[in-house]
């Protein structure tokens, strides 16, 4: 089972935070199993990069091949140039002469670059902690909310769901199933105004003393300006219910979308001032280099990474683990 904070019988709502390293130690077997899945999910990207280091010489041709492999992995021009410059410096400083050893130095370089994305999700500084979740259609947004709900409930947190994706009946039904599975309450209104549903949910969360209110919003493309404006409206209306909220605004990204994921991050961040990301579907076809592009160009915390559809396939992000899995 994954968790992102230590389990305590009576958590202090004012100070409780997540601790990824402690969780990794606490649930080592489960974490190990998940890492095997992550390695499998990143194998396509990793194999393409690893073949660069199968030669016998460290020369300009090696770095050119590596540049091409990183760009093909959707690392982006800026992150690729950073990694190449950093790697060359590490090779020089360590006096490395074997290509195979350069691969390990690249792991260190990628881990260092991705470190800026590693940050725990804080739960408990506000009651309720209001988390607004958005993303494009098909990114796995509602499923990620369901998984997050389940794990919050498993940790003893009281959760209220807001089905603010009022235009898609399947979304409300899907969220309702997750609410039933996790035995949590849900605020839903067929065909209602998403902002009104969000307001009602936050108000109810405060009145009922809930720890967390999770707001599911309708999927949309960042080019759909009228729908992006609706997201800003939801945010404003939530603030009317609680002036300090939303405390987290998360964007769910499909890891298969490559450089388009970076465009989504920029567009949604410009519109909403995102506080974190959830990367989903790193399950075999994804190009994991996009996290390097995000780290270099729009470094927002990656709270969770998903490698499949199962409950245990969503885990906290760790920069070193990701770098090692990428080049394992």
Image: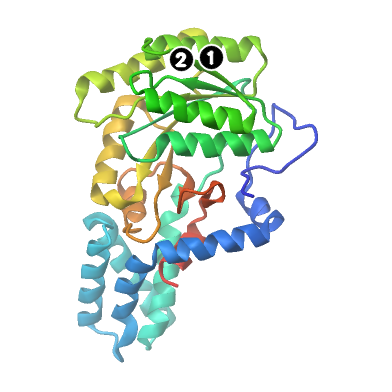
Is 277 in front, or is 157? 157
Q: Quadrant of residue 8?
A: top right
Q: Quadrant of residue 61?
A: bottom left
Residue farthest toward the right in the current orientation of the protein: 9
67 vs 194, nearest the viewer: 194
Element type at mark 2: helix
164 left or right of 263 in image = right
- Specify whether 241 is left or right of 3: left
- Vertical side of 146 occupied by 279: above or below: below
Circle 2 residues within 10 Å: few <14, some 14–19, many ≥20: many
Q: Position of residue 145 (x, y in %)?
A: 49, 34
Residue 299 in the image: above or below residue 267: below
How does the figure colour the protein chain or chains?
rainbow
Looking at the image, which residue is at 61% across and 22% down?
Answer: 126
Residue 140 circle label = none
In the rendering, at what x and y percent does residue 187 appear?
A: 52, 16
* Rendered view: 31 above or below 46: above
Height in image: 118 above or below 231?
below
Q: Can residue 183 be seen by looking at this rendering?
A: yes
Q: CA distance from mark 1 to mark 2?
A: 6 Å
User: In the image, 152: left or right of 278?
Assistant: right
The residue under label 2 is 198
From the top left corner, tell me how far across and down residue 301 is, in percent.
Answer: 45, 42
Disc ID at residue 202: 1
CB atoms at circles 1 and 2 under 8 Å apart?
A: yes
Q: Residue at x 45, y 73 (%)?
A: 328
Residue 68 drawn at (x, y percent): 21, 69
Residue 86 is at least partly visible in this image: no
**SS at mark 1 in the image:** helix
């Amino acid at each position: 089972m994954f968790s992102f904070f230590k389990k305590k019988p009576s958590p202090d709502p004012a100070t409780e935070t997540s601790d990824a390293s402690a969780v990794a130690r606490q649930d080592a077997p489960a974490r190990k199993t998940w890492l095997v899945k992550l390695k499998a999910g990143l194998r396509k990207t990793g194999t393409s990069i690893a073949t660069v280091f199968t030669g016998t010489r460290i020369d300009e041709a090696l770095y050119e091949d590596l540049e091409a492999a990183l760009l093909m992995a959707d690392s982006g021009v800026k992150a690729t140039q950073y990694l190449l410059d950093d790697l060359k410096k590490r090779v020089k400083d360590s006096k490395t002469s074997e290509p195979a050893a350069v691969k390990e130095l690249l792991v260190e370089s990628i881990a260092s670059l991705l470190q800026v994305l590693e940050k725990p999700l804080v739960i408990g500084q506000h009651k309720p902690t209001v988390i607004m979740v958005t993303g494009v259609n098909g990114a796995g947004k509602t499923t990620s909310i369901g998984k997050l709900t389940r794990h919050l409930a498993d940790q003893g947190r009281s959760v209220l769901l807001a089905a603010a994706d009022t235009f898609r009946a399947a979304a409300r039904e899907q969220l309702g199933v997750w609410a039933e599975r996790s035995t949590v309450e849900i605020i839903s209104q067929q065909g209602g105004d998403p902002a009104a549903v969000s307001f009602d949910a936050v108000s109810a969360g405060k009145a009922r003393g809930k720890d967390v209110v999770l707001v599911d919003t309708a999927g949309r493309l960042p080019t759909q300006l009228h729908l992006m404006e609706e997201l800003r409206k939801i945010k404003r209306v939530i603030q009317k219910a609680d002036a300090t909220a939303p405390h987290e605004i998360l964007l769910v990204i499909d890891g298969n979308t490559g450089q388009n994921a970076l465009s989504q991050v920029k567009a949604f961040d410009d519109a909403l001032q995102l506080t974190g990301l959830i990367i989903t579907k790193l399950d075999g076809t994804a190009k994991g280099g996009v996290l390097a592009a995000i780290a270099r160009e729009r470094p927002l915390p990656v709270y969770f990474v998903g490698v499949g559809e199962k409950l245990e396939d969503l885990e906290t992000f760790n920069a070193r683990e990701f770098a090692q899995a990428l080049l394992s």
